[in-house]
Image (cartoon, rainbow, N blue to C red):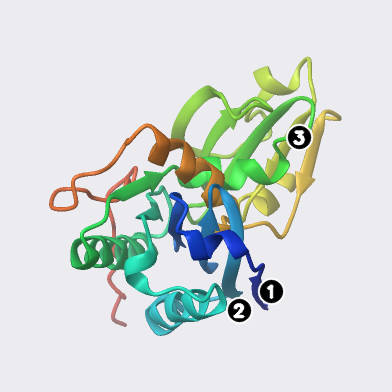
């Protein structure tokens, strides 16, 4: 899949420097996504997904782009929000390192947002349960279970998908599966209550409201010590020699 998207919505009230101007960074999947939100609403967005990880090449350019689209300087930002995982080890490292560096440089708070909750927010108006899925290679996914108010029903976990996965949740209600792990689930899970929403990735477009909630109650991270939530250790596989 390939897409590149940019968006901007002008607000006169930016001139009056209302609080709640957040820079949102999402790099947990193959979607490199950056937005500016004002009081929880996205006013500028730039993201690309070309089927591979391009965060190292694109992230800082996208940050400059959304600031320009919103007609803001970096020091106009009130806080920096970053998707904390789980997800790609390298993607999370790049996003969190950038967020921490900017937060420290402009002396503004750092906010972390659950990646799976960011993904689940794309279908939060549906009746039933939402299960966001991030591909963790082979038949494994990172997942969590949310209700339509985005309240956590089952905690984040790494699991191997079988035909019986999520059976207890599917028994009595509709369940919406989405994310880049949904494709592998669709091949095995055939329950009539299962709906698979393909082609969805965590996006900074959904981060603004979630980050704003934390900003209002001053739920900030320690810039010096914050680390991404990897869920499991990074493992490399050595290439076998013939």
Above or below 173: residue 197: below
Q: Residue furthest front?
A: 16
- The residue that appears at 67% across and 67% down in the rendered structure is 9
Q: Which residue is mark 2?
A: 50
Q: Tell me: 233 left or right of 224.
A: right
- Label drawn at residue 220: none
The alpha-carbon separation of the residues under discs 3 and 2 comes to 28 Å
**Callout 2 environment at 10 Å: few (<14), some (14 to 19), or many (20+)?**
few
- Of badges 3 and 1, nearer the viewer stands 3
Q: Tell me: 166 left or right of 23.
A: right
- Give SS at disc 2: loop
- Label drawn at residue 1: 1
- Label drawn at residue 125: 3
Which callout, 3 or 2, points at the residue further toward the start of the chain?
2
Q: Are marks 3 and 1 in contact (CB under 8 Å)?
A: no
Residue 51 is situated, as x and y percent measured from the top left of the image, at 59, 75
Q: Residue furthest left?
A: 224
Residue 78 in sight here: yes
Residue 218 is situated, as x and y percent measured from the top left of the image, at 32, 36
Which callout, 3 or 1, points at the residue further toward the start of the chain?
1
Above or below 214: residue 111: below
- Give SS at disc 3: loop
Which callout, 2 or 1, points at the residue further toward the start of the chain?
1
Q: Are marks 2 and 1 in contact (CB under 8 Å)?
A: yes
Residue 102 figure quarter: bottom left
- The residue that appears at 76% across and 34% down in the rendered structure is 125
The alpha-carbon separation of the residues under discs 3 and 1 comes to 26 Å
The alpha-carbon separation of the residues under discs 2 and 1 comes to 6 Å
For the N terminus, the quadrant is bottom right
């Amino acid at each position: 899949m390939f897409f590149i998207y940019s968006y901007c919505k002008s607000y006169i009230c930016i001139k009056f420097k209302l609080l709640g101007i957040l820079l949102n960074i999402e790099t947990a999947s193959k979607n490199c996504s950056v937005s500016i939100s004002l009081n929880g609403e996205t006013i500028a967005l730039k993201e690309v997904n070309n089927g591979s990880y391009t965060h190292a090449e694109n992230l800082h350019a996208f940050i400059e782009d959304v600031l320009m689209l919103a007609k803001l300087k970096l020091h106009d930002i009130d806080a920096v929000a970053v998707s904390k995982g789980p997800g790609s080890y390298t993607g999370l490292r790049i996003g969190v390192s950038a967020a921490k560096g900017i937060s420290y440089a402009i002396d503004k708070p750092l906010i972390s947002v659950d990646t799976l909750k960011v993904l689940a927010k794309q279908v939060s108006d549906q009746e039933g349960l939402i299960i966001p899925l991030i591909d963790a290679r082979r038949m494994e996914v990172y997942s969590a279970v949310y209700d339509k108010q985005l309240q956590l029903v089952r905690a984040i976990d790494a699991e191997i998908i079988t035909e019986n996965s999520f059976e207890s949740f599917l028994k009595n209600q509709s369940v919406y599966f989405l994310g880049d792990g949904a494709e592998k689930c669709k091949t095995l899970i055939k329950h009539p209550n299962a709906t698979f929403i393909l082609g969805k990735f965590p996006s900074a477009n959904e981060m603004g409201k979630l980050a704003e909630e934390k900003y209002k109650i001053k739920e900030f991270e320690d810039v010096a010590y914050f680390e991404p939530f990897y869920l499991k250790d990074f493992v490399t596989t050595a290439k076998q020699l013939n």
